[in-house]
Image (tube, rainbow, N blue to C red):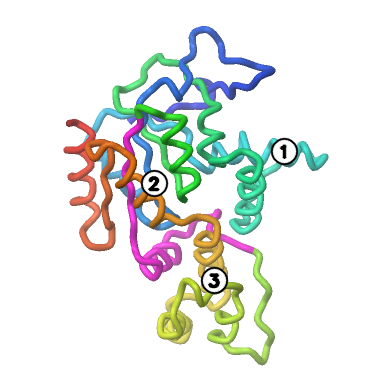
Amino acid sequence: MHHLSWDQVHISSAREPRPANYYLLTELAPVVMVGLTGVGKTTLINQLSARNVPFTLLPNRREIANRVIIALLQREDGQAPHPITDRLARFEYTARYRARFPGGLAHALSQLAIYPAKLESILIFDGLRGLDEVEQATVFFSQARFVVLDAPDTVRLKRLLNRNDVFDTAKTQPAPANQNLLSALNNIPDVESVFSQEQLLQIAALADQGQSPGEDLLQKVSIIVKERRNYDSDAAGAYLRQHWPPDRVLIIDTASQPAEDVAQQVVGWVKD
């Protein structure tokens, strides 16, 4: 695996077009991973690397959001660009950018030009999320292939609880001292559109069993719900099935099989 550094990436714009020896990413044929938080994109990347699959990894979604989206909006807000780790705040920034530029992150990705030296033949981007991003990506990247990863929300929640990523934090209103965890979970806006009452009971029980602190559960559930409000991954996969060449779309449920089997499917597919 070759991880493309920002020294090899140029952010193009009307004021600052790409250098002559750089390729616009829109001219190339990237493999674009599609999926929400916790579906297994990073695990798949690690599995491909462990199998010595020759590929170049583009700066990931988080890095591009920092450099292209959040920094732009912070400057417009009169602020010096600075890190934002709170996931809910990051969703607000990307929603603002998407309201101005259809496709959001896909639009930001289309602004990149890369230096071709040492590139492996397989160029991977991790990753896009909802329908709007994927639909615009098919416009910007006419040669792209898409790997769509999916998993039930309860599975994604368990993965978030176990991975200890600093970016999996969110500022949430603390539950009142006299309010139990189940009530606090039910007070998360739109939680009922993602989790059933039975699922919320099972989630609250994780704290009672000592498997996860209540505040951590509230944060992670808030992230999953907010992400679902911003991105429709089911519609993204359906769009690709209907509108993209079948040999350039691979859709995998990562909860139904081991990570090793998922990787093996992708290895065979990317080498075809």
Q: Position of residue 250 (x, y in %)?
A: 26, 44
Q: Nearer the viewer, mark 2 or mark 3?
A: 2
**Quadrant hosting residue 70:** top right
| Crowding at mark 2 (Cα within 10 Å: few <14, some 14-19, many 20+) | many
Q: Is 234 drawn above or below residue 27 in the view shown?
A: below
Marker disc for residue 127: none
Q: Disc number at residue 34?
A: 2
Task: Name the residue tied to disc 1.
Answer: 81
Estimate the spatial distance between the alpha carbons at disc 2 and disc 1, rounded to whole Å: 27 Å
Please check the rendered image and state whether residue 160 is part of the magenta-colored stretch, yes or no: yes
Q: Is residue 219 above or below residue 72?
A: below
**Image depth: mark 2 or mark 1 in front:** 2
Residue sitting farthest toward the right: 78
Disc 2 marks a residue whose amino acid type is Val
Q: CA distance from mark 2 to mark 3?
A: 26 Å
Q: Can residue 168 be seen in the rendering of this structure?
A: yes
Could you tell me which quadrant the N terminus lies in?
A: top left
SS of the residue under disc 3: helix
User: For the magenta stretch, what is the residue range?
Assistant: 144-170
The reply, left or right, for residue 211 in relation to residue 12 is left
At mark 1, the secondary structure is loop
Residue that carries the numbered disc 3 in the rendered image: 216
